[in-house]
Image (cartoon, grey):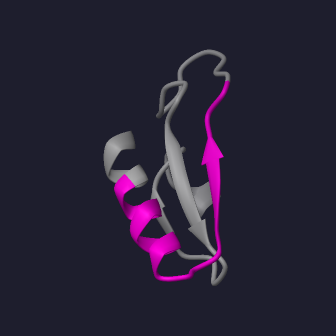
Amino acid sequence: MEVKEVYQALGKLIAEGERVAVATVVKVKGSTPREVGAKMAIRANGSFVGTVGGGCGEA
């Protein structure tokens, strides 16, 4: 999912009154599944939109 799509989803969630947090990759070292700037919106119930990693950390 592209950053633009995460922002669009954030706008919708906020407009619907949902509480959300945003995780952003700010630094990487070595080989990583996502680049600096990758974003993920996390809902209060633990579900999320987008990804900042490769899987198990978000499971």
11 falls in the magenta region = yes
Can residue 46 be seen in the rendering of this structure? Answer: yes
Residue furthest top in the image: 30
Horizontal placement of 50 versus 20: left or right?
left
Q: Position of residue 39 (x, y in %)?
A: 52, 44
Q: Residue at x 47, y 34 (%)?
A: 33
Q: Position of residue 18 (x, y in %)?
A: 57, 80
Q: Residue at x 35, y 56 (%)?
A: 8
Q: Position of residue 11 (x, y in %)?
A: 43, 62
Horizontal placement of 19 versus 47: left or right?
right
Can residue 2 be seen in the rendering of this structure? Answer: no
Residue furthest front in the image: 15
Q: Is residue 29 above or below residue 50?
A: above
Residue 11 or 5: which is nearer the viewer? 11
Please identify the quarter of the rendering in which residue 21 is found: bottom right
Which stretch appears magenta?
Answer: 8-26
Image quarter of the C terminus: bottom right
Q: Position of residue 32 (x, y in %)?
A: 53, 27
How many numbered marks are there?
A: 0
Q: Residue at x 67, y 22 (%)?
A: 27
Q: Is residue 47 above or below residue 54?
A: below
Q: Residue at x 61, y 40 (%)?
A: 24
22 falls in the magenta region = yes
Q: Is residue 10 above or below residue 25?
A: below
